[in-house]
Image (tube, helix red, strand yellow):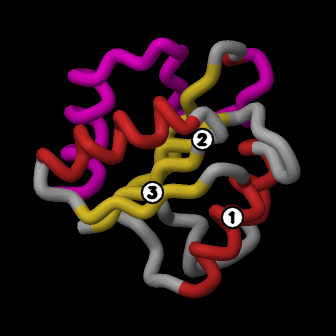
């Protein structure tokens, strides 16, 4: 089971990578939306994605919108992590930063193990 973490903040990205790897997940990371879209195009879809909204180059909203137009990616559960939930697309699960790790893990377990 692979989880994708997309966040421009290195500390957040690497901390989440460690947490998910400790839980037995394979983890792919991207520092921005352009990198995430490139990884998604080349690899099998993850079982869940943790996506920051505000990033350089390509932001989280654009990544989410592009995923929704691709039948292969539109079913990937996306968890938005942001300090400003008002910018999030409607209908997406939002976790306000700082993220509650227990809640995040429970949510990803539910998506990836169902």
CA separation in Å, label 3 and label 2: 10 Å
**Depicted 40 relative to depicted 67: above or below:** below
Judging depth in this view, the residue of 28 and 74 nearest the camera is 28
Q: Which residues are magenta?
A: 86-114
Residue 17 percent coordinates (x, y): 34, 46
Question: For the view shown, which residue lies furthest in the right direction?
Answer: 57
Q: Which residue is mark 3?
A: 4
Judging depth in this view, the residue of 38 and 109 nearest the camera is 38
Residue at the location (48% across, 43% down)?
Answer: 50
Residue 105 percent coordinates (x, y): 24, 35
CA separation in Å, label 1 and label 2: 10 Å
Q: Which residue is mark 2?
A: 7
CA separation in Å, label 3 and label 1: 11 Å
Label 3 environment density (alpha carbons within 10 Å; few <14, some 14–19, many ≥20): many
Task: Say whether residue 16 is left or right of residue 88.
Answer: left
Task: Say whether residue 98 is left or right of residue 31.
Answer: left
Residue at the location (65% across, 40% down)?
Answer: 8
Residue 111 percent coordinates (x, y): 29, 51
Magenta stretch contains residue 112? yes
The image quadrant of residue 35 is: bottom right
């Amino acid at each position: 089971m692979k989880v994708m973490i997309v966040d421009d903040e290195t500390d957040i990205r690497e901390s989440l990578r460690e947490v998910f790897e400790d839980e037995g997940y394979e983890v792919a990371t991207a520092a921005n939306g352009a990198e995430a879209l490139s990884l998604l195009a080349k690899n099998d879809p993850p079982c869940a994605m943790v996506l920051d909204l505000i990033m350089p180059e390509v932001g989280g909203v654009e990544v989410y919108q592009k995923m929704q137009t691709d039948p292969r990616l539109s079913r990937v559960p996306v968890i938005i992590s942001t300090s400003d939930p008002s910018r999030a697309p409607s209908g997406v699960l939002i976790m306000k930063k700082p993220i509650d790790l227990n809640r995040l893990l429970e949510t990803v377990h539910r998506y990836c193990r169902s």
